[in-house]
Image (tube, rainbow, N blue to C red):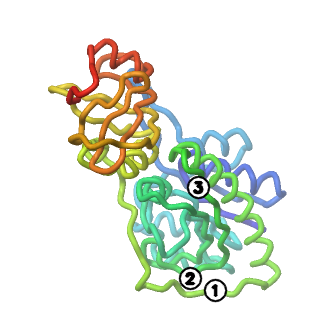
Amino acid sequence: MRILFMGTPDIAAESLQALLGAGHEICGVFTREDKPVGRKQILTAPPVKQLAVQHGIPVWQPKTLRDGSAAQIVRELAPEIVVVVAYGRLIPPEILSMPKYGCINLHVSLLPKYRGSAPIQWAVLNGDARTGVTIMQLNEGMDTGDILMVSPVDIAPEETSGELFDRVSAQGAATLLQCLQAIQAGAVTPTAQNEAEATLAPPLTKEMAQFHFDWTAEKIHNWVRGMNPWPMAFFVRGEKKIKVLECRVAQGEKAAPGTVLSTKPLLIQCAEGAVELVKVTPEGGKPMAGEAWALGQRFAKGDLV
């Protein structure tokens, strides 16, 4: 198919690579602007642009899609379909109606659950056992279009958002190829989303990453997994942030939340159950085993964190 691709981050680049590998004609790419990256703030092209340039595909980085110029580009490119993966902008009606097969979007959740920009993270934060990918027909809303194809993905009990994201990205690229084949064959049946079941997955913030030991151990465990690799879950001791990279749910005792139950391994009582702090990063320090951090703090059983 003749495809105009719109996307920005790694997950979009993986889908673009799959489309190229399957022999689709990519007539152009829309992506977000280059951004400063790292401590030296080096202006860096998004992954989709880097891949497109490698393959000699024309790239546009419009600051808006609503001034008419983007629509003119799409009109001249004359794609059969527009494929959108994590582009980061809503597509205006003028563009939605142009291609023969319209515009489709790959979303990494089982819609209508987790509409928005952080569906993978919220699935882990909420302790879900399953997520997946949805290919939908785009409309003017945010992730509200008719569902064309769904592919579920199980979430492992210890899996982080980062680990899950890698698996879902691969599943998404494969599902996208299947869906395009079905669209071309006229073998898809659009299904309207049930608005009553819709939930949102808003962006994460650094402030949201803080947890407290008066939470249940299960919730803390999910928070640590869900906030990994960014922004990383943390608790505060004194005035210092202690990031937790890895933890496990453990058996609790009759003690106040935040009580040290053991230092080898480092077990902390929660409102319900306890958590073993497997790996932490003290503020200003390097990642270390929870036991090593406990030793440096001279913790003893019965102390409060």
For mark 1, does the 10 Å Cα neighbourhood hold few (<14), some (14 to 19), or many (20 or more) residues?
few
Q: From what the image shows, is residue 177 above or below residue 183? A: above
Q: From what the image shows, is residue 47 above or below residue 68? A: above
- Of the 4 image quadrants, the one containing the C terminus is top left
Q: Residue 185, position in %: x, y?
A: 82, 81
Sequence-first disc among 2 and 1: 2
Q: Residue 31, position in %: x, y?
A: 53, 52
- Residue 231 visible (yes or no): no
Q: Nearer the viewer, mark 2 or mark 3?
A: 3
For mark 3, does the 10 Å Cα neighbourhood hold few (<14), some (14 to 19), or many (20 or more) residues?
many
Residue furthest to the left: 238
The residues tagged by marks 2 and 3 sit, at their Cα atoms, a distance apart of 25 Å
Q: Quadrant of residue 154?
A: bottom right
Query: Circles 2 and 1: CB distance less than 8 Å?
Result: yes
Residue drawn at x 24%, y 40% is: 255
- Residue 214 visible (yes or no): yes
The three-letter amino acid code for the residue at tag 2 is Asp
Residue drawn at x 50%, y 55% is: 120
Q: Quadrant of residue 199?
A: bottom left
Q: With 122 as the anchor, is 282 left or right in this view?
A: left
Q: Nearer the viewer, mark 3 or mark 1?
A: 3
Q: Residue 210, position in %: x, y?
A: 27, 42
Tag 3 residue = 155
- Of the 4 image quadrants, the one containing the N terminus is bottom right
The three-letter amino acid code for the residue at tag 3 is Ile
Which of the two residues, 221 or 37, is positioned nearer the viewer here?
Answer: 221
Q: From what the image shows, is residue 242 above or below residue 98? A: above
Tag 1 residue = 190
The three-letter amino acid code for the residue at tag 1 is Pro
Tag 2 residue = 146
Q: From what the image shows, is residue 89 above or below residue 167? A: below
